[in-house]
Amino acid sequence: MTAIIFNNSVYGMTGGQQSPTTPINASTTTTPYGNLENPFDVVSLAIAAGATYVARWTTAHVRQLERSIKDALLHRGFSVVDVITGCPTQQKMKPSEIIKFQKSIKSLGVFKKEEREEFVSKYFKLIDILKTERL
């Protein structure tokens, strides 16, 4: 299974409300005085949830993002790609400013890539064992 998370730090399609990834102190329609909650780090959350492929890129890193999505889709196991996207309305930035900001982000790359036997494979092996025991 692969989860590709388009992360613009708000629920933009419904009016720019706070989301689990809204930065602390960021102003949204539902946090006009700033977000008081610490945001989720999608990469840390995915690793803690047992994902075996975890990466983060921005929409300014097109080639790396494309390669990472392909790797995630081909990877056996749970894969997560956190894609930092811009929201010109919420961030009150021009698209060129968003791209410049995204290119300055340092915490990008593949954070985990681990080969591990998948649950379905283990399940089918158990079925085979049970079939032979019945004979």
Image (cartoon, rainbow, N blue to C red):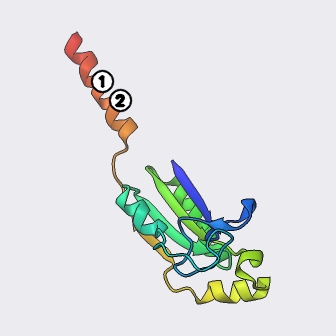
Residue 1, position in %: x, y?
51, 47
Residue 83: quadrant of the picture:
bottom right
Crowding at mark 1 (Cα within 10 Å: few <14, some 14-19, many 20+): few
Q: Among all residues in the image, which is located at the extreme left?
A: 133
According to the picture, the residue beneath numbered tag 2 turns out to be: 124
Three-letter amino acid code at the position of disc 1: Asp
Q: Which residue lies at the image location 64% right of the left edge and 70% below the top edge?
A: 8
Q: Among all residues in the image, which is located at the extreme front?
A: 33
Element assignment for label 2: helix
Res 82 label = none
Q: Are marks 1 and 2 in contact (CB under 8 Å)?
A: yes
In the image, residue 91 sits, relative to residue 125, either above or below, namely below
Residue 132, position in %: x, y?
24, 17
Residue 12, position in %: x, y?
71, 65
- Please indicate whether residue 75 sits to the left or right of residue 50 in the image: right
Three-letter amino acid code at the position of disc 2: Phe
Residue 67: quadrant of the picture:
bottom right
Q: Among all residues in the image, which is located at the extreme top?
A: 135
Residue 78, position in %: x, y?
45, 52
Q: Is residue 78 visible?
A: yes
In the image, residue 94 sits, relative to residue 11, either above or below, namely below
Figure quadrant of the C terminus: top left
Q: Is residue 73 visible?
A: no
Q: Which residue lies at the image location 34% right of the left edge and 32% below the top edge?
A: 123
**In terms of depth relative to the viewer, which is nearer, 26 or 91?**
26
Q: Which residue lies at the image location 59% right of the left edge and 61% below the top edge?
A: 5
**In terms of depth relative to the viewer, which is nearer, 12 or 50?**
12
In the image, residue 120 sits, relative to residue 34, either above or below, namely above
Res 128 label = 1
